[in-house]
Amino acid sequence: MINFQQLPPAGDLNASKNRLKYCAQQALLKHAISTAFNGHSDGFQELVKAHLNLGKQCQDTGLILSLNAHIWGSIFPLLLYGSEAQKQTWLPALLSGELIAGHAITEPQAGSDVHALTATASATDAGFILNGHKRFITNTPIADVLLIYAKLDGKLSGFLVKKTDGGANFSDQPRVTGCASATMGDVILQDCFIPLERQLGKTGAGGMMIQNALELERAFIFAGIIGIMQWQLEQVIKFSRQRQSNGLHLGANQAISHKIADMQCRIDTCLLWVNECARLKDAGKRISLASAQTKLIASEAFLQSSLDAVHIFGATGLLEENKMLGLVQDAMASRLFSGSSEIQKNIIAALIGTGAGYKGKA
Ligand SMILES: Cc1cc2nc3c(=O)[nH]c(=O)nc-3n(C[C@H](O)[C@H](O)[C@H](O)COP(=O)(O)OP(=O)(O)OC[C@H]3O[C@@H](n4cnc5c(N)ncnc54)[C@H](O)[C@@H]3O)c2cc1C
């Protein structure tokens, strides 16, 4: 297991960049990547173990979010949809952490509803002109390149936009309070020209690319977060043994010990789900249903356990410097990123043949 004791401390934008780079230098990005790209050629089970270990050691949901945006938002779309030339151009630097990336789907007026996206790309002889406004994009202020989704001839498509491209503004505002160490910001594209070779995937493949990226993100982002939940539980158990009430340690009260037992059950349930996604991926099977279920169950579990942890700590849990309070905000954010809990339920309902999308006979 990698030792993350030397992880650079969290702080400003540079610190966020260095922390992500450090993870790459510790070979964290090599899991489920073939040796052709200097990866370990192992499977998703190994990736889950490595992320779990990182989460437990760093206890930083922001770093986990940033890392996952880089992996599922840029590296995997390049692996799945890139031409040989694109893979050779981008993957070595993305996998080594020399370049940082992410993906930009959300817009100020379009979050859950990807059909409402309005960013556009228009073709010229030499490339594309992009216009649009993206919001809440993880890694934007530290990204060298972002995979941006825009409509070309009315069809959703993917484009690799560099921070240095004329007409591209990668900002560091606005940002949300949860997952504080992950950087975030708007991307504003004003007649931003990019050359032909920076279209990723075919014209119109954007919807499928987003779906694949989000399925992977939903399946595996909680591997790291479960590591944080394990650390959270350890702290709660320690506190419940030390803190005295009516001459007994806190955990002697069934009302407290049952909450702690629930926290343990949630961790184990989430772990079963994430491992199930890894098992399916390693067997070459679809994860559409399992990843939506994992995201829904794990984000709700993370929130409930974080609320329980703060409660068990009493007022100490509400001290600003207490990590338990920050985890509640992180958990609130986790119910939204990669698609909200309601959207996961919509997906699950549709996949089992019911919900608003069902048009067939009874
Ligand atoms: C920490 C963080 C990081 C993020 N990183 C990225 C990123 O890297 N790239 C990116 O593109 N985006 C990113 N996002 C944006 C994220 O994808 C959106 O927040 C999410 O899709 C929800 O969109 P919204 O916030 O606009 O809410 P809305 O879509 O406006 O939804 C508002 C509320 O209504 C509910 N709702 C909406 N539609 C339905 C429906 N059809 N049925 C039932 N309920 C519904 C939602 O669940 C939510 O509770 C990030 C968000 C956060 C919080």
Image: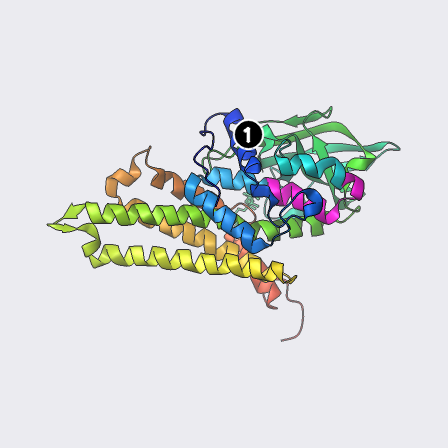
Residue type (three-letter) at the residue carrying disc 1:
Lys
Q: Is residue 306 above or below residue 166?
A: below
Residue that appears at 22% across and 59% down: 254
The one nearer the camera, 198 or 191, is: 198
Q: Which residue is mark 1?
A: 17
Q: Position of residue 350 (x, y in %)?
A: 61, 63
For disc 1, does the CB lie below 8 Å from ligand 1? no
Taking depth in this image into account, of 54 and 80 the one nearest to the observer is 54
Q: Quadrant of the C terminus?
A: bottom right
Q: Is residue 95 magenta?
A: no
Query: SS of the residue at dot 1?
Result: helix
The residue lying furthest to the bottom in this view is: 362
Q: Residue at x 81, y 36 (%)?
A: 197
Residue 117 location (% of width, % of height): 67, 43
Which contiguous range is marked in magenta?
A: 70-86
> Residue at the spot x=45%, y=30% of the render?
10
Q: Of 175 and 238, which appears nearest the observer? A: 238
Considering depth in this image, is 118 or 92 the residue closer to the camera? 92
* Residue 287 in sight here: no
Colour convention: rainbow
Residue 138, how many percent across, how many down? 57, 36
Q: Quadrant of residue 121?
A: top right
Which quadrant does ligand 1 occupy? Answer: top right
60 vs 251, left or right, is: right
**Relative to residue 161, is residue 102 drawn left or right?**
left
Residue neighbourhood size for the residue with mark 1, other residues' Cα within 10 Å, grouped as few (<14), some (14–19), many (≥20): many
Q: Is residue 162 above or below residue 116?
A: above
Residue 109, image x, y percentages: 61, 40
Chief SS of the magenta region? helix
> Is 6 above or below relative to 87?
above
